[in-house]
Image (spheres, rainbow, N blue to C red):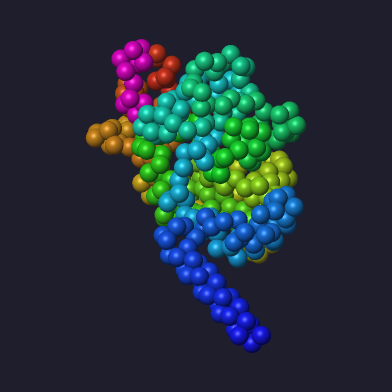
Amino acid sequence: MIAINLKRQNILLALLGLLSVAWILLLSDGSDPYSAAGDLLPRKLLADPGEMSGLEKSAALRSSGSREAHELLAETYDEKKSVIFLIAFGERATSTTYVERTIMSLRRRGEYQGRVLLLTDAPDERYDGLFDANVIIMHPKEEHLKTDFDFPAMTVKRFKTYIIDYVDMVPELDAVEWIYYVDIDILFGAPFRDLIQKLGEENKIQGDNNFSSKLYFFKNSFVDQYVAQSGFMIAQRKTSNTANHCLRLWRSVIDSQLKLEHDQSSLNLISKDIESGKEHRCQLVIMEQGDHISFPHNNRDLDAMAKDSTYTSLIHIKNTSKSTSFGEGVHEKFVSDVLMLSDDEMKNGKLLEKTTFGMSHLS
């Protein structure tokens, strides 16, 4: 009986030894530990996300060692997980070719062929057939219109706070994680991928799974009283309500300040609440402009940029009365070069026209 038990014990020890060797080989075979079989992850992580609280999911991701919680955007940028968001409202915006110019520069010098979402109140025929299949055109929902502001332009600016909501309405955009809002008076002068990778490195932009809410803006270098320049914004799209918190907060502040003329003023108020500790769920990340964005105002600005046909990633032409300082033909030559227009395209005068609706209407 003792001999039989010892024999069984030896067999069990041998089996355990084989299992240990197999486990060591599994961990050392060069495979990605983050892609291990489902049963190696906490079972809570395998549950329907809708059945888990934010704290549970965050804890599950941390305990699983999920790489996603630490991925830097600079290293993981993917066009398929990105969408460019444009807004064009009112006759002064939709009667011009600003949208066409922005998208043309995005596709050409920006080398971005991914999804673009255009939110506009223009009739369907305005942009019908003008763009490729990756440009999605949507119209605003009536319940999102608020018109009791002292400055009517705030009705349009307020739609920036709905960018996640409108992306959520499009099934084709389910894979999108990063939303890049861009004013339509911005042209792209260099590859968009390079811009995002540089901004990601400089600002440590990463896909967070701690359900924080962040918005990324460039620093406002023109008007000292404003913290941010709101013509370009980065937002991470997540499935939790917390992810949308900053945008909802921004909208709430705008709605409570009907006399504000600029949306930057409402960002200032949020920034003050963050600094005082009153607001702790939202983070506004202010990025240095560096050589990422330029604001040409006169002939000298345009000539300096056009000299070698090298441009900043974003070119924000401020279409205010200052644009009248552009000499005859200088603005047109600059825009045609940025857009890389062919001779036939240059015959379309509307692509090159100057207007003065810009800063007061969109920025």
Residue at the extreme left of the image, as rendered = 308
Residue visible at 52% across and 31% down in the picture:
116
**Magenta span of residues:** 337-347
Q: Is residue 257 left or right of residue 63?
A: right
Q: Position of residue 88 (x, y in %)?
A: 57, 27
Where residue 29 appears, x then y in whole percent? 42, 61
Q: Residue furthest bottom?
A: 2
Q: Position of residue 282 (x, y in %)?
A: 63, 55
Q: Quadrant of residue 188?
A: top left
Q: Residue at (37%, 38%) from the top-left corner?
A: 191
Residue at x 59% of width, y 35% of height: 173
Viewer-closest of 163 and 312: 163
Dominant secondary-structure state across the stretch colored magenta: helix
Q: Is residue 297 left or right of residue 134?
A: left
Is residue 126 in view from this perspective? yes
Asked if residue 345 is among those painted magenta in the image, a careful observer would answer yes
Q: Residue at x 49, y 17 (%)?
A: 130
Determine whether 6 is above or below 182 in the image: below
In front: 14, or 57?
14
Question: Relative to 179, is 119 above or below?
Answer: above
Decide whether residue 79 is among the magenta residues.
no
Q: Quadrant of residue 85?
A: top right
